């Protein structure tokens, strides 16, 4: 039977554990790409209007499970570098999950055992779907498929032309356009509201 305790566990998993696992996954890209001289890296947390941006951190207003990594280029452009970058999120979740699992097995973190067991579950969930080569939405490959293609063919061979990891400059340009659209919409709403207020005032005068 699904009770209040299960609901609290679901909320914890959905709003705390899952976002943390996804952030850890995206951090894997950042850490590995830094080894190969990444240019203009960015870790974006959340979506919608920007709250603040410090260095490579970009924190948005609406935060849930939406975090992603972007960069413009690598100084060392070779297949080995790109394979390592795509391995980054797999390794980050795998290393963290195995470490936490080892600590639990040795009697540590016992007080929050349930929390960490769920954390390990979601970490391995992403490792599984990142590591096993497969084609996802709109024919886009996952990390495992790109690694397989680069090892076998030396390049991506899928028909989806979208970049697997977006360019930071493109992301910023798109963000500015979205914010301009939102600002125009807000101004239209204000004008419409003022127009309605004026009409009401005119009716009262009559």
Image: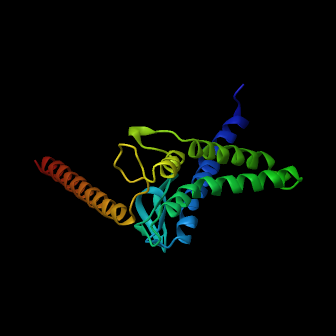
Q: Which residue is at a point 43% across and 71% down the rendered structure image?
A: 40
Looking at the image, which residue sits at the far right? 107
Task: State the colouring used for the structure image.
Answer: rainbow
Q: Residue at x 31, y 63 (%)?
A: 173
Location of residue 13 (image quadrant): top right
190 or 81: nearer the viewer: 81
Q: Is residue 14 left or right of residue 51?
A: right
Residue beneath the point at 71% across and 47% down: 120
The image shows residue 140 at horizontal and vertical percentages of 42, 43
For residue 114, above or below residue 30: above
Q: Nearer the viewer, residue 150 or 15?
A: 150
Residue 192, percent from left and from top: 20, 51
Q: Is residue 136 above or below residue 110?
A: above
- Work out which quarter of the rendered image holds the N terminus and state it: top right
Say how many tags the image has: 0
| Position in image of residue 129 (x %, y %) | 58, 42
- Which residue is drawn at the image coordinates 63% and 42% (left, top)? 125
Q: Is residue 134 left or right of residue 164?
A: right
What x and y, as percent, mark residue 201?
Answer: 17, 52
Tell whether 151 sits left or right of 188.
Answer: right
Query: Which quarter of the figure has residue 188?
Result: bottom left
Question: Which residue is at the far left?
Answer: 206
């Amino acid at each position: 039977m699904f009770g209040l305790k299960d609901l609290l566990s679901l909320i914890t998993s959905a709003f705390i554990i899952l976002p943390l696992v996804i952030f850890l996954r995206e951090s894997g890209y950042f850490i590995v790409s830094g080894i190969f001289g990444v240019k203009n890296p960015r870790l974006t947390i959340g979506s919608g209007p920007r709250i603040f941006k410090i260095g490579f951190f970009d924190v948005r207003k609406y935060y849930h499970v939406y975090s992603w990594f972007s960069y413009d280029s690598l100084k060392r452009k070779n297949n080995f570098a790109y394979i390592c970058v795509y391995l980054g999120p797999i390794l980050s979740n795998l290393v963290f999950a195995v470490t936490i699992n080892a600590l639990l097995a040795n009697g540590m973190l016992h007080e929050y055992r349930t929390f960490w067991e769920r954390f390990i579950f979601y970490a391995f969930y992403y490792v599984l779907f990142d590591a096993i080569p497969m084609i996802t939405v709109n024919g886009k490959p996952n990390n495992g498929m790109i690694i397989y293609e680069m090892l076998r063919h030396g390049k991506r061979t899928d028909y989806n032309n979208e970049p697997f990891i977006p360019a930071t400059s493109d992301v910023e340009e798109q963000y500015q356009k979205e914010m301009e659209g939102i600002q125009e919409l807000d101004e239209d709403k204000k004008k419409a509201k003022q127009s309605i207020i004026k009409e009401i005032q005119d009716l009262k005068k009559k």
